[in-house]
Image (cartoon, grey):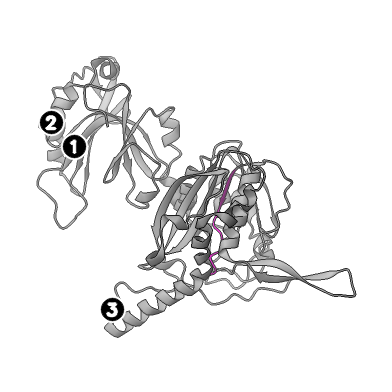
Amino acid sequence: MATPGRRACLQYLIHLAQDNLDFSPPCCFRERQYIYCQNISGAKDDIMTVVCFLSAFELWGHGRTHSELRTSLRNYPAEQMLPFLHKDSTYRINVYTFNKTLDFTERIKRIDAMDYLPFEGLVSLKSPQHVFCLLEDYGTDPNNIPEHPYYIYFGRWIADGQRELIRSHSVKNRHFIGNTSMDAGLSFIMANHAKVKEHDLVFDPFVGTGSLLVACSHFGAYVCGSDIDYNTIHGKGRSSRKDQKWRGPDENIRANLRQYGTEKLYVDVMVSDASKPVWRETALFDAIITDPPYGIRESTRRTGSHKETTKCSHVAVSQSYHLSEILADMLNFSAHRLVMGGRLVYWLPVYRPEYCEEMVPLHPCLLLISNCEQMLSSHTSRRLITMEKVKEPEGLDSLAHLSNPRFSAYQGHDTFREKYFSGLNKRLNKESKSDVKGDSIIPGSDNDRWQAPKENKHEPIH
């Protein structure tokens, strides 16, 4: 991070939301719930699409004490400060504290103490032209709050992130849901990582109930998907809602987009086997965003056949589709169907005691951009993997995984289901013996989304 007085460019302070901290975009420096960024082009527009951000500020000064903050602010270039402080402007100063509450009197004292700044405009509490913020960081331990802040920041407010999207798109209020419908916040995070924007074409090969399509369409992308489950695609079978036995005739992915006013961006979804792509061999998609089945709540299946020796026709049947095969097929599909610079974003489940970075599958045409962890339990987690297409496939690129030493490592994902339930049973047995209830895994609860439910018996396919 550049020191005060040596700024070659503007610096930005981004205040992160406290959930899913690991999924924030890459940055040049990070401290607790804040990150520093430089050279943000179109900063306001970019920030307003990110759900991990609470707010973003043009950083003017910082320090461990108010005295250091004052010195830092006095070193800030006047030519960058004065356009917002002139006599014809209106302004307001907000005081934010993290992990500590200040009463009104203390906040006013903080503001009055900054009279050394050359504000010449008028104060406007309701509709100021410029908003400035003083942020005090008191650490993360609510049981050990220091008397004085660890760090203090001051800057000009630029924009707020889109945290409201998490509430407005909550799965609880969604028209069509399933056992594994993706949480709204995580869906938007995946869209952020894929850099989804207006007029993009986004594809989900394991579309389920379309949660990822909902998120991407919010940013103006055209969306489409596929899934091997006929009942899910057509909105048939048993409902996932506890007070509803069967899905209604209008419960489908299109209805979800209609609910949020983005139906015009719905291309279509189709019943299709991800191991046998039906798309023509050309670059089509700006982003491929998906959550492959892990074999916990949804089985990992693909189509096969039992051919009769005396007839040409055959009957398609369901076969096992190992997770390592899913990953290899998905990377090859992305290498061929993504446009140059397009991104693949997906979840990779891992058994934590055995995880290492070498287990993340690679592809010659795809560059690994980020690898973030979401804890599911003490023994399992899933990694949000973001990759970007950097070259067109050629020669034997589609078979590169067979000679890649990482392939043998991520073949271990084939037994993820067994390891998941093995670790779960050990934990439950241990808790049962010690009669500990506070940290137990409750089927269907938020602290373990992947606890396997009772098997759904779908209507027969005619």
N-term mark: 2 or 1? 2
N-term mark: 1 or 3? 1
Give how far apart the Cα atoms at labels 1 and 3 are. Answer: 41 Å
N-term mark: 2 or 3? 2
Disc 2, disc 1: CB below 8 Å?
A: yes
For the question of whether residue 128 can be seen, the reply is: no
Q: How many marks?
A: 3
Q: Which residue is mark 2?
A: 68
Quick check: is 291 in the magenta stretch?
Answer: yes
Q: Which residues are magenta?
A: 287-296
Which numbered marker is on residue 152?
A: 1
**In the image, is 77 to the left or to the right of 197?**
left
At label 3, which amino acid type do we have? Val
Which quadrant: the N terminus?
top left
Disc 2 is placed on an element classified as helix
Magenta stretch secondary structure, dominant: loop
Q: Mark 1 packing: few (<14 Cα in 10 Å), some, or many (20+)? A: many
At label 1, which amino acid type do we have? Ile
Give coordinates of residue 179: x percent, y percent.
54, 66
Give coordinates of residue 130: x percent, y percent.
31, 25
Q: Is residue 191 above or below residue 404?
A: above
Give how far apart the Cα atoms at labels 2 and 1 are. Answer: 9 Å
Q: Which residue is mark 3?
A: 436
In terms of depth relative to the viewer, which is nearer, 339 or 374?
Answer: 339
